Amino acid sequence: MKQPFFLCLALLGSAALLAPAAKAQPKSGGFSWANLPTAQLPTFKPDTFNITTYGARPDGRTLNTQSINAAIADCSRKGGGVVLVPGGLWLTGPVELKSNVNLHLRRAAVLQFSADFDQYPLVLGSFEGIPSYRNQSPLSGTGLENVAITGSGIVDGNGDAWRAVGRDRLTESEWKKKVASGGLLSEDGKTWHPSAKALRGAQVPNPGGVVAGKTAPDYNDVKDFLRPNLLVLTNCKKVLLDGVTFQNSPAWCLHPLLCQELTVRNLLVRNPDYARNGDGLDIESCRNVLVEGCTFDVGDDGICIKSGKDAEGRKRGVPTENALIRRNVVYHAHGGFVIGSEMSGGARNLFVEDCTFMGTDIGLRFKTARGRGGIVEDIYVRNIAMKDIVHDAILFDMYYFMKAPPKLADGTAAPAEVPAVTEATPQFRRFFISNIVCDGAERAIFLRGLPEMSIQQITLDNLVLRANKGVELIEAQNIIISNLRLETLSAASPVYVENSRSISFDGLTVTAPGNQPLFGLSGARSEKITATRIEAGKNRPPVEAKAGASAKALKVKG
């Protein structure tokens, strides 16, 4: 008797709890599931510095910037301790963290950042992996050691004041309210901008880009467009973010950059679904990281690994490495767990387990493009539950924001020059993904490499996936997919392979409508494809080959 889909989910979930993975996996850099990366926690003196002692008032009207920063500076100068934010609505401008300081927000505390753009001076920083002038972040710190934000209060970045928004992203009443609040509309009337400077910045290329001879005042005419990330910590050691709600960021929400010994736990991170660049957590070029027990509901990627963009990222050359990400929940986001696309410094030794993605656009999302460079390797993912994924449950794509090669009428790729492999060629290799459940997606698995650099050495094991479409492998090499139960709604071939080689399917059970061939092969470079232990219906043909592919490229062994 056929088992109901949800019973299969329960059985797979139970098996995942009992065993770390279905197959033994190699160690990497000394790390394994039996020897996971760790992060050192900061320590603080018990001395407490209440911001009210320095004149702060919780009336939502008094600008408390000077009082809060004075408390932090005094605490650090006296050897450190806890800067206490009691219950109340605390209006403030930029807050600068200091070494040996734990900024602690009590449950009823709201640290409300001002919507007055003049409170945020232009500073030289980083945005999307490259140096850029930005408005100073509401919360920031550079070169610190032993620093924390803890408690159960709320940090609100007032991001709606900063962000442009399209009319199509709001209800009619929301749009009317937004227009009535001030600001300017784009020429076509479809996008609201908060000010003339913000609109001007949207009309010029790379408005905050660093240019020789230009200083911060030279960017004043586009200042309001240069939205800050809510929290930026740069070159810091022993960092703890624990228990707090971070919400409504102008751009990215949490951005640790070049940090070591970073612990992020028990956070609630929120942004509207229309928030441009409204990422939850972007970990860039950091080492020794723990992210656990957090919940994300944001406007862009949920938990994202980065390491710089293109030549600037390669010049920095600092990967994100040695990270454990576990027991997190992601609701709306462009991706649940994401690597890229700015990964030019590389990423390695990342372990992700026991996470849930509910309604995210993509579940596991690994993205890059020509020109990035960087090597992403030794990535381990297990015990992931997904439901109602909008697009792909598992995606590897090396054409991020690029056009895929055009195809001729017969499905073959149009003639095109294949670039030489250089330091600007990105690489994805040695991913080990197991115990994955997805109930609902547009496509189950999508892997797309480059003609000059295939996606390589990907192992996917013990999967139960229900989606409209099945599996697509394009420009992939040395791929192992084992113990996959695939339920699709589309009448197309459940598995499509294009210009890929050394592909192994072992233990493939398919439930799909119609009687299309199980495998669709395309491209003359498709070869060495094997399939064993297949259950796909008695009358389903094994293969259809087109666009230069040969049916002999597939060997079915039972």
Image (spheres, rainbow, N blue to C red):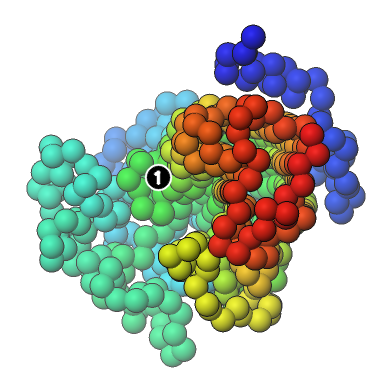
Q: Position of residue 379 (x, y in %)?
A: 73, 49
Q: Quadrant of residue 185?
A: bottom left
Where disc 1 sits, the SS reads loop
Q: Is residue 352 left or right of residue 371?
A: right
Rendered-image quadrant of the C terminus: top right
Is 555 left or right of 178, judged from the image as shown?
Answer: right
Q: Position of residue 94 (x, y in %)?
A: 42, 55
**Which residue is outermost to the bottom?**
213
**Near-viewer residue (3 or 140):** 3
Query: 10 Å neighbourhood of mark 1: few (<14), some, or many (≥20)?
Result: many
| Residue 507 seen | yes
Residue at 73% over, 54% down: 552
User: Percent x, y for residue 46?
Assistant: 67, 34
Residue that carries the numbered disc 1 in the rendered image: 299
Residue shown at the point (63%, 60%) measured from the top left: 549
**The quarter of the displayed image where residue 60 is located:** top left
Does residue 436 lie above or below 309 as drawn?
Answer: above
Q: Give the residue displayed 34% in from the left and 82% down from the top.
A: 218
Q: Inspect this view and state whether residue 156 appears.
A: no
Q: For the residue marked with disc 1, what is the amino acid? A: Gly
